[in-house]
Image (cartoon, rainbow, N blue to C red):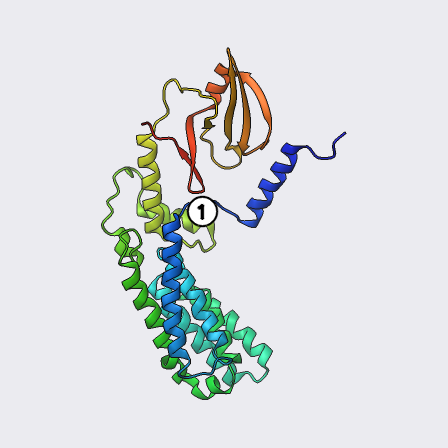
Amino acid sequence: MKLFDKPQVLYFLSECKKYLGIEANSTSKTEKIISGIGALIGILLCQIVTLQYFNTGESLLLIASMGATATLIYALPHGALSQPWSVLGGHFVSAIIGILSYQYISETLLASSVAVGGAVLVMYFLRCLHPPGGATALFCTQGGETVHELGFNFLIEPLLQNVVILIGVAILFNGLFSWRRYPAHLNFRHIKNQSLSYLSHEDFSAALLQLDSFVDVSTEELAVIFDRAMAHADSNKPQRKLLLKTGSFYSNGSLGEGWNIKQITNIENSKITYKVMLGNNNGLIEECGQRAFRQWAKFEVEYVQGSWIKRTEN
């Protein structure tokens, strides 16, 4: 008797991916390369500026903070955490709290902890939550004598210069590509919603509010995503009689745990043999009648750039 069969192992691995937060990445290779080039340019300029004020060892924490910011604004230019106010406000608020923590709390460990915790709290209230800000706050407490001597002058030299460089390069660099304008509003303001006849901006805001947890997506971007999904659904409505083909993939169109992708491996008379490719019973091979399979299948799908989408009619 087998301790583990293949479907159980595949299901376990699928659940592990979900708990680890490993999602399908639908971005193209071109988009990935563009993000890397943008980050390279931005952080190179930041290092050149920062080394005018600190030596290599002293600048490590600050450069690490700027590197995290570069990752956000070049890889996720439309993310809520990547927008100019989050970048500018997040770093400045964090730096101010970090400087005050060092000046008024003598114990370094406590000062660093208060700086990071205080930075997160204030960034939340000022709507400029930016994760790299925590590293900036830490730098102001543990950056060494040079940064301590600068005091509030650090806000201008070199922090403001670094932030302006990253935002400026992001505006210019992302502006070269029509699908990734920065700030995000430049990308969305020309898009007109056509299919949202009964959903409004306020409905999406209410939905995000009910989550009671910060989500790195703006209401504007969420509305555009939903609108495009609705448009795609309207243009790819299920066929009245789905054509079943050996080797093709099919979905039941469900959401969440009920979602399944199955591949037909053989069709013989009225019987179909299929393999569960994704979802519950992953890896399971079973047989059923064509009528039963048609009742389950909503549409044919294909795997494109890491995501399953409806197969477009040729």
Name the residue tied to disc 1: 25
Q: Which quadrant is the C terminus positioned in?
A: top left
Mark 1 burial class by Cα count in 10 Å: few <14, some 14-19, many 20+: few
Image location of residue 210, percent across then percent down = 44, 49
Determine the residue located farthest toward the right in the rendered image: 1
Identify the residue at image location x=50%, y=11%: 269
Image location of residue 184, percent across then percent down = 31, 56
Q: Considering depth in this image, is 265 or 254 the residue closer to the camera?
A: 265
Q: Is residue 127 visible?
A: no
Query: Quick check: 177 above or below 291?
Result: below
Image quadrant where residue 12 sits: top right
Identify the residue at image location x=34%, y=65%: 85
- State left or right for residue 218 relative to residue 103: left
Image location of residue 266, percent across then percent down = 52, 20
Identify the residue at image location x=47%, y=44%: 24
Query: Quick check: 139 above or below 296?
Result: below
Q: Is residue 37 visible?
A: yes
- State left or right for residue 295 relative to residue 9: left
Q: Which quadrant is the N terminus positioned in?
A: top right
Q: Considering depth in this image, is 75 or 247 the residue closer to the camera?
A: 247
- State left or right for residue 197 relative to residue 43: left
**Helix, strand or loop under label 1:** loop
Image location of residue 53, percent across then percent down = 41, 84
Identify the residue at image location x=30%, y=62%: 173
Determine the residue located farthest toward the bottom in the rendered image: 149
